[in-house]
């Protein structure tokens, strides 16, 4: 393995099958050097050495952990060939196909050459550098499009009007199109970009919009988008499961908006502690490209200030670091430490034991004002809650990490070692609890869950003494209501400082977002109001309601509940009921879209053999294409001839027709293409029942009298909202217990189970 220590790295690029180019920033300039690269993989079964015939050497690691053999190769393709041979061998052993090396806990393979080289060496990105040493560029574009239509990069008449760029040393430049000559604009920007030679390119929606648009326009004009180092092309990266994000070889890309959306609460809290927290997301729709560059810079600065020390300690490429979390950071750090000490690498074997999901008692109702908090370092502090007896039962590798880093958690708040300790111990907690992790350990996870639950109960009691009520706990996030006499940012800062003085030793509550109000309906069902916008707070699944009109109703209703606009909510409900009764809508508002799990012919055979119950989408297809004629007897122009198109994975769009309530959905389903607006035949009673079922989700928020008053149809008497108000109720028990109550008890828009 490469053992040399290389510091001040700002970029790594794959040069060929056995060479990497390393870019170091020294004295304000970039120094490029080629280093030999030896691909490697670790295995648990020594008998697989014979399978890897192309391996040039093998090394045995000391220790009792599973991954004790490291195979090395001359070239990168040889490593992939060996992976394929191992997959074939394992498939034959198990007598079932193993499609990916990620499904083999007895195999460790890093699919990125840069990540492999970092793990096998003592090098990390940005070691020896500060945020001020990096050359960071903020990038934004302005595009033209036909009136009323979005701009498209593949449309020749659309074009880039302006490219704005700023550098971390204060330099700014703006490139504007002249006489519709987009090719000249791109060429001028390319020359300036190469001369500036940035280490990091930043921008709001950089990877989803800006870079793809520039690449497409360059291709349209025959310009090579060589924005990477040493002429490397702007390109789409590849991953083991398909295409990845756009990349600039030798440089890092960073989108602060994407990082804010995907970063875990612990990382957001570390960033918030580094600089004052913001309560709004960056605005991609700022008026000009120059303003968007300023916005990107303001949002990127705290991330670099807080996370650069972590990047300098974890052997991961920066792009991968930003898109992963503490669990992956811990695994990368652990692999590097094991290889450096020639020690076997842990792997649990992917235990599939399901753990009970803990959720403390919460409350339903409306809460104002409210905040989203994260406890730092709650997951790291869980390790200190283990007794000495429990700690002695930990696997040696876990006990070693705990004993090394747990004392450092109480270090100075701004210390690099403390930040690294919090990140690694948080990652250790995530890794042993996640069933998809190679480090998952059920017994250790159960002990940690008990420690985290005990800490959560202590924190809730402490917050209650400070007039802060816990609404719900979702993962690492706490949603709370705080006193309504705290109006401005300075008073909020002083208030949370006072709260943290009373917190259990070593824990701090870091506010991530503030809300004017939060409505909590059920476990994990919450919405927040911040100014004019309504935010759907974290939840594990998307809405389940298949009918669009129900989703649209709830999107509007929750905003009215957050604003306590009862009269408008009553009008919305009455208007929706009237539209259903009068059929004053279109098929697109009430049709359902289902994906077939098997072909239509398979369904017919299973029904004939009484091995399957009737299913609405399949029955709709049979009514349209003929229920009795076999597919082989169909003529070329008959409806039956289209039956071969309905294979597994096909989408069926249908609705419920008729006027009877005593039949199942399967007996009344009909393809949407047969709906006639001049003679509508949808089952209005069915859709009224669907609406009323979904309204039950709001029952916990109201008294019985108020619920009936708000959600009933217009009556002879006018609606009076003077006495309408929300009530608060306890959400006792755990999510696991709620789910165990039966399939008819749900927490989504559709309270009953989805009928078929």
Image (cartoon, grey):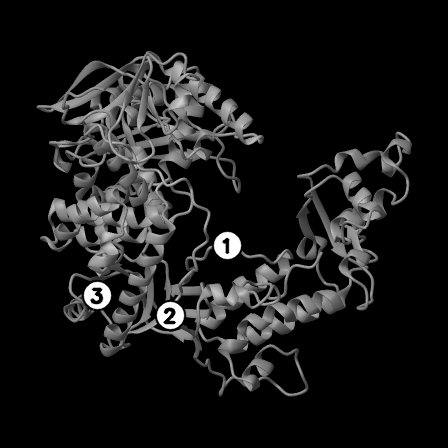
Q: Position of residue 683 (x, y in %)?
A: 78, 63
- Distance Cα–Cα, label 1 vs label 2: 23 Å
Quadrant of the rendered structure where residue 528 is? bottom left
- Distance Cα–Cα, label 2 vs label 3: 16 Å
Q: Is residue 139 visible?
A: no
Q: Position of residue 682 (x, y in %)?
A: 78, 60
Instruction: Identify the element where label 1 is drawn.
Output: loop
Instruction: Identify the element where label 2 is drawn.
Output: strand
**Label located before the other in sequence (3 or 1):** 3
**Label located before the other in sequence (1 or 2):** 2
Which residue in the protein does label 2 denote? 517
Q: Is residue 276 above or below residue 328?
A: below
- Of the 4 image quadrants, the one containing the N terminus is top left
In the rendered structure, find residue 489 and report the number of the disc placed on it: 3
Q: Residue at x 20, y 58 (%)?
A: 388
Q: With 553 as the anchor, is 756 left or right in this view?
A: right
Dots 3, 1 in contact, CB < 8 A:
no
Q: Is residue 186 visible?
A: yes
Q: Residues within 10 Å of mark 3 (few under 14, many from 20)?
A: few
Q: With 417 as the anchor, is 49 left or right in this view?
A: right
């Amino acid at each position: 393995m490469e053992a040399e220590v290389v510091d001040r790295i700002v970029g790594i690029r794959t040069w060929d099958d056995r060479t990497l180019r390393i870019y170091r920033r020294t004295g304000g300039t970039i120094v490029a050097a080629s280093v030999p690269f030896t691909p490697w993989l670790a295995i648990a079964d020594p008998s697989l050495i014979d399978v890897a015939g192309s391996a040039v050497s093998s090394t045995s690691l000391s220790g009792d952990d599973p991954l004790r053999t490291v195979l090395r190769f001359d070239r990168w393709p040889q490593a992939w060939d060996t992976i394929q041979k191992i997959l074939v061998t394992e498939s034959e052993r198990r007598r079932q196909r193993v499609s990916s090396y990620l499904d083999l806990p007895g195999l460790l393979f890093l699919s990125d050459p840069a990540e492999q080289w970092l793990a096998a060496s003592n090098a990390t990105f940005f070691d020896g550098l500060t945020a001020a040493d990096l050359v960071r560029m903020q990038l934004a574009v302005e595009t033209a499009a036909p009136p009323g239509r979005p701009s498209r990069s593949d449309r020749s008449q659309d074009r880039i009007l302006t490219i704005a760029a700023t550098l971390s040393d204060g330099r700014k430049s703006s490139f504007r199109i002249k006489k519709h000559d987009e090719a000249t604009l791109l060429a001028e920007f390319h020359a300036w970009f190469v001369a500036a030679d940035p280490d990091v390119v930043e921008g709001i929606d950089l990877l989803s919009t800006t870079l793809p648009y520039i690449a497409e326009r360059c291709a349209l004009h025959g310009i090579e988008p060589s924005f990477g180092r040493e002429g490397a092309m702007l390109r789409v990266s590849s991953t083991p499961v398909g295409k990845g994000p756009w990349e600039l070889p030798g440089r890092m890309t960073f989108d602060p908006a994407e990082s804010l959306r995907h970063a875990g609460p612990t990382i957001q809290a570390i960033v918030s502690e580094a600089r004052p927290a913001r309560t709004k997301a960056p605005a991609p729709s700022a008026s000009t490209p120059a303003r968007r560059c300023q916005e990107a810079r303001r949002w990127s600065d705290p991330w670099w200030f807080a996370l650069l020390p972590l990047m300098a300690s974890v052997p991961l490429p920066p792009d991968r670091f930003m898109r992963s979390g503490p669990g992956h950071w811990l695994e990368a750090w652990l692999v590097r430490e094991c290889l450096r000490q020639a020690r076997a690498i842990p792997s649990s074997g992917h235990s599939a034991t399901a753990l009970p999901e803990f959720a403390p008692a919460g409350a339903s109702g409306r809460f104002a004002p409210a905040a989203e908090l994260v406890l730092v370092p709650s997951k790291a502090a869980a390790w200190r809650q283990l007794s000495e007896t429990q700690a002695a039962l930990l696997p040696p590798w876990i006990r070693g990490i705990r004993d090394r880093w747990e004392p450092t958690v109480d270090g100075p708040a701004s210390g690099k070692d403390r930040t690294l300790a919090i990140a690694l111990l948080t990652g250790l907690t995530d890794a042993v609890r996640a069933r998809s992790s190679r480090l998952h350990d059920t017994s250790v996870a159960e002990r940690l869950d008990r420690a985290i639950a005990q800490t959560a109960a202590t924190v809730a009691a402490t917050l209650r003494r400070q007039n802060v009520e816990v609404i719900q706990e979702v993962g690492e996030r706490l949603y709370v209501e705080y006193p309504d006499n705290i109006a401005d940012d300075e008073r909020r800062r002083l208030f949370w400082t006072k709260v943290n003085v009373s917190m259990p030793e070593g824990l701090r509550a870091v506010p991530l977002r503030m809300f004017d109000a939060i409505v909590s309906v059920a476990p994990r069902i919450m919405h927040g109001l911040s100014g004019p916008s309504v935010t759907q707070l974290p939840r594990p699944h998307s809405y389940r309601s298949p009918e669009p009109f129900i989703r649209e109703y709830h999107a509007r209703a929750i905003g009215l509940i957050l604003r306590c606009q009862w009269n408008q909510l009553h009008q919305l409900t009455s208007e929706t009921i009237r539209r259903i009764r009068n059929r004053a809508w279109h098929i697109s508002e009430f049709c359902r879209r289902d994906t077939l799990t098997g072909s239509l012919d398979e369904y017919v055979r299973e029904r004939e053999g009484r091995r399957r119950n009737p299913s609405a989408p399949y029955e709709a297809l049979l009514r349209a294409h003929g229920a009795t004629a076999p597919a082989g007897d169909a003529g070329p122009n008959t409806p039956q001839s289209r039956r071969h198109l309905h294979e597994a994975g096909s989408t069926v769009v249908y609705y419920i027709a008729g006027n009877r309530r005593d039949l199942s959905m399967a007996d009344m389903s009909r393809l949407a293409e047969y709906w006639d607006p001049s003679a509508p035949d949808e089952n209005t009673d069915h859709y009224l029942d669907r609406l009323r079922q979904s309204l039950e989700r709001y029952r916990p928020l109201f008294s019985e009298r108020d619920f009936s008053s708000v959600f009933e149809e217009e009556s002879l008497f006018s609606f009076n909202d003077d006495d309408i108000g929300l009530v608060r109720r306890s959400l006792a028990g755990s999510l696991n217990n709620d789910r165990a109550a039966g399939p008819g008890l749900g927490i989504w828009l559709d309270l009953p189970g989805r009928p078929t």
